[in-house]
Image (cartoon, helix red, strand yellow):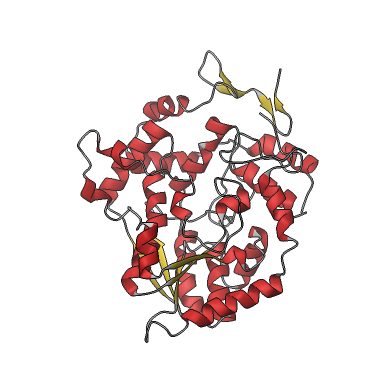
Amino acid sequence: MKYCNNCLMPDTRPGLMFDESGVCSACINYEKQKLNDWGDRWKQLEKLCDRHRGKNGNGYDCAIAVSGGKDSHYQTYILKEKLKMNPVLLTVGNTDWTITGQKNLENLSERFGCDIIQFNPNRQLTRNITKKAFVEIGQPSWYMDMLLYSYPLKMAMNLGVKLIMYGEDVNFTYGGKYNEETPSAMLQTQNGIVEPLWDKWLEDGNISEKDFDSARPPSVDECKKFGLEPTYLSYFVSWNSVHNFEVAKRLGFKHLGHEYQREGSLDNYDQIDSLSYLFNPFLKYPKFGHSISTDNASRWIRYGMCTREEMIPFVERHDGKLDQGVMEKFCEFTGIKNNEFWNILDKWYNPKFFKQDKDGVWHKKFKVGTGLIK
């Protein structure tokens, strides 16, 4: 277990690469982007929008995949107010909502005057797969994540919209399978974040092929044949999640702090629309030894807001804390009982990084920023 010499991301993050000086690909790519000619990139974005503006008759110029969060506000602000596009906002409903999350999604329509088309998934099917995915692959949000990838593509095509905008390229920005900067999000469904494990859920006969119709993304060939252009906004504008939050606040976005004080995170403004969904990123901790607080701290270090040394005690104190409300909402939705929950969770603790004591409590075998303790 080795840590990036610049931030606090360990090499246990799937797909993360390190150079010979021990710096991770996320930090390397962030520094590379400082050399971009953002003025020229903006002109490219204007040309892209001009090419699609008004090409769908009296319909929408483009689609934006949104959740209602800070980045959704920033994307809509750029496309609607700065570039004068007429976007339709496409979103997938949560299994549970925070009040703040609901209000933020409504604010997108109120503030920008945009239509929002929301897909509310089959709760029975979602519950079934969410529980199975927790038990069998340790990724309970698998089905919801597949919907987040597939629904905007499908709906954009149904509406005759050929330009669909996403936020950041997760692989390039945070480290992953694809490490080349590109404006095209065409391969987003193949980025390794959510594997196409369709056959796995058919094994017990309780789920059919037809049940997956909504979640199966169109193929790359189908998208190309239609003329769809899935695009990352982060290629054209400098992407900074804290800056996006500051802009979103001015547009009516609310953070979670006035409604709920969550554990395990250093911020109160990222992924705040659903509590149960947060169980999925928590599971990075038992599997890989890092979770949401590590993500927060590493971004802030890259942004120059703080130093690596300053953030180590914060990550030590907060990372890997399982928020009680997150657990309760997850169990409430899936129907998993308390004892069953802990027994399933135990199987996802990696013995390389954790040791279980005689009472069942797990203790980490590493020090943040250093690695395994000998």
Counting labels gives 0
Residue 346 or residue 187, whichever sits in front: 187
Q: Is residue 278 above or below residue 41?
A: above
As drawn, is 323 to the left or to the right of 195? right
The answer to whether residue 322 of the structure is visible from this angle is no
Residue 250 or residue 309, whichever sits in front: 309
Residue reaching furthest top? 358
Q: Position of residue 291 (x, y in %)?
A: 58, 39
- The residue shown at (74%, 55%) is 31
Q: Is residue 210 above or below residue 44?
A: above
Q: Position of residue 49 (x, y in %)?
A: 52, 78
As drawn, is 321 to the left or to the right of 332? right
Q: Position of residue 174 (x, y in %)?
A: 61, 49
- The residue shown at (71%, 49%) is 28
Residue 65 or residue 25, whichever sits in front: 25
Quadrant location, the N terminus: top right
Quadrant location, the C terminus: top right
Q: Position of residue 61 (x, y in %)?
A: 44, 79
The answer to whether residue 291 of the structure is visible from this angle is yes
Q: Is residue 113 above or below residue 168?
A: below
Question: Which of the 4 image quadrants contains residue 19?
Answer: top right
